[in-house]
Amino acid sequence: MARSFLTRRSLILGVAASGLATPALATTPTAAVRRNTSSFVTQNWQDHFDTLGKAAIIADTTSRALHYWNADGTDYRVYPTSVPMTDELTKRGYTKIVRKKVGPDWTPTASMMERFPHYKYMPPGPDNPLGTHAMYLGWPAYIIHGTHDTRKIGRRSSDGCIGLYNSMIEELFAITPIGTQVLIL
């Protein structure tokens, strides 16, 4: 009787060689998309704004990243974000930062109350869904804010807002002037 020399190592190497262990490498993308090592789609402010003005923010809901440029373009930063749960909750277009608040309180909107009747007003603090800092947009009830629930970042998890880690919204809050132009893609 012939002896089989099938070892775990030869099995793993055989599967890897056949391509079964690497299906992602076997597929080719249908469109060329520029990405950095974090998987964020690269954005250029010139593609969306005529000038930087006071500053510019692009919140890309597809790659779940917020891009920031200061007034002269020398400071460019990218932050991971949470984005709205559905396209119906996502407002897209141009707006600006109209107000900023450290320690925001939170009041659910009428549409949130319809979907989640148990929601109630929350003062600033560790349970507040707006985190430690909030930058209010020109559209009512749309905010770029922090979150205490770090599991939300990188996911479709908000009711329309753009969320950042508290440490990152604190940094962005400090460098973003009121009047900063914002584009939600």
Image (cartoon, helix red, strand yellow):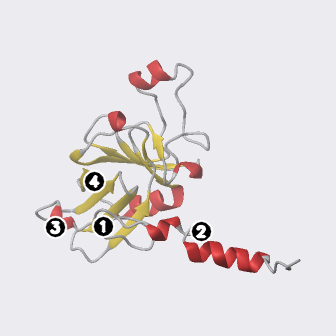
Query: Which one is nearer the viewer's eye here, 74 or 153?
Result: 153
Q: Which mark is residue 178?
A: 4
Please report whichever mark, 4 or 1, sits nearer to the chain's N-terminal start: 1
Q: Is residue 69 above or below residue 81?
A: below
Q: Residue at the far right: name it.
A: 1
Amino acid type of the residue that numbered disc 2 sits on in the rendered structure: Ala
Mark 4 Cα shell of 10 Å, populated few (<14), some (14-19), many (≥20): some
Q: Earlier in the sequence, mark 1 or mark 3?
A: 1
Give the camera-side residue of 77 and 125.
77
Task: Give the vertical position of 3 relative to 124 (above or below).
Answer: below
Residue 26 placed where, x, y %? 46, 69
Q: What's the amino acid at mark 4?
A: Ile
Q: Disc 1 marks which residue?
A: 33
Q: Which residue is mark 2?
A: 21
Residue at 54% in and 32% down: 122
Viewer-proximal residue among 1 and 30? 1
- The label nearer to you, 4 versus 1, is 1
Occupied quadrant, residue 111: top left
Kindly check if marks 1 and 3 are in contact, taking CB atoms under 8 A apart as contact: no
Evaluate if marks 1 and 2 touch, with contact meaning CB atoms under 8 Å apart. no
